[in-house]
Image (cartoon, rainbow, N blue to C red):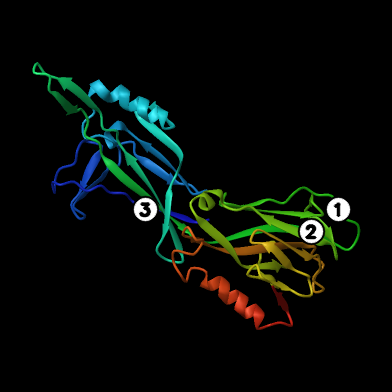
Amino acid sequence: MRFFAISIFFGFASSTFCPNSAWTYNSAENNCAPAADSGFSFTCNNDGSITVNFKLEHLYSYVANSFASDAAAVLSSNSATGPVNDVFTFQTKAMTFSQSTNEIIVGSFTLAGELFTEEITDESGDISTMELSDPISTTITCQFSSSVDTSANLEISEGATIAGTTSTVNLADAMVATLSSNGESRTSFTIGETVEVSISEPEAFAAAGAIAKIKECTVYENIQQLTNPIPLLKSSSCGMNVLSAAATDEFNFSFSAFQYSSTSNENFSIKCSYQICIVDGNGNPTLPNCFDNVDAEKSDAEADSALFTCS
């Protein structure tokens, strides 16, 4: 899955003041951003998580010695590691996902400091609460492509089945395709055998309320996926008749092994394209037309009943 990191900014009331040396003023945007040499960085991970490196100065306008150790303890209790050279790390923190276009899913994570307070009782018995820290809250966002492809390579021969190991091809660590036959992990098959394809669902997006649907699955004559594409599935509902292609759900399908008569090449490749959409509590896309490209593939197959059978 391709992803794109977005710069993050935090706005302050003053047009020229940033809270400390870990921040730098951006006059064009009239806001403050983490300084280049401040130890701040983040990585948008392909499994839908985020890794953030930061210092206490990114969480507080002023870090007093009286609560610096308390702040570090709070970070540790929230799974932050460090500090190493004063830099803490949040690893694989879950993000909140939203979707405003069919092409992009946005993940966001808020990095925020803790408000430290202390109560004091004066001579008259009145209780006053003192705020000992000035927390900063900063939101980091990542963009993920909602259109993804996953592939697996296989060998088909005319003779006896050749033992092989499972073919696992990672798509940016998000979706993994594996091959088998009769429950046995394989990469080699004979003509006519049933090839079973299983694709793992992106756990981070599933947990965030996203659904992935097959747009199409295709077999190519070579592993470079350049020549003689043969469609296996158009959406999960329509399979190619002559190859008995059929899907049991969005992540599992099968077809009959074959060879191309135009070549002696036995090594082929399968490619499946998916559309991922954020859905509401009722399972409906938050963008009503998000799965339109999936529906279009199904409509094309339904119009070609000689080639496809649709459920």
Residue at x-position 81% and y-position 68% = 259
Which numbered disc flags the more N-terminal residue, 1 or 2?
2
Q: Which residue is mark 1?
A: 162
Task: Please identify the residue farthest to the front as the structure is shown.
Answer: 125
Tag shown at residue 155: 2
> Is 134 left or right of 154, judged from the image as shown?
left
Using the numbered discs, state the Cα–Cα distance from disc 2 to disc 3 in whole angstroms: 41 Å
Residue 216: x percent and y percent?
A: 63, 69
Which numbered disc flags the more N-terminal residue, 3 or 1?
3
Confirm whether residue 195 shows in the render.
yes
Which amino acid type is marked by label 3? Ile
In front of the other: 173 or 157: 173
User: Disc 2, disc 3: CB below 8 Å?
Assistant: no
In front of the other: 53 or 228: 53
Using the numbered discs, state the Cα–Cα distance from disc 1 to disc 2 in whole angstroms: 9 Å
Confirm whether residue 171 shows in the render.
no
Select label 2 or label 3 by which is in front.
3
Which numbered disc flags the more N-terminal residue, 2 or 3?
3
In front of the other: 171 or 136: 136
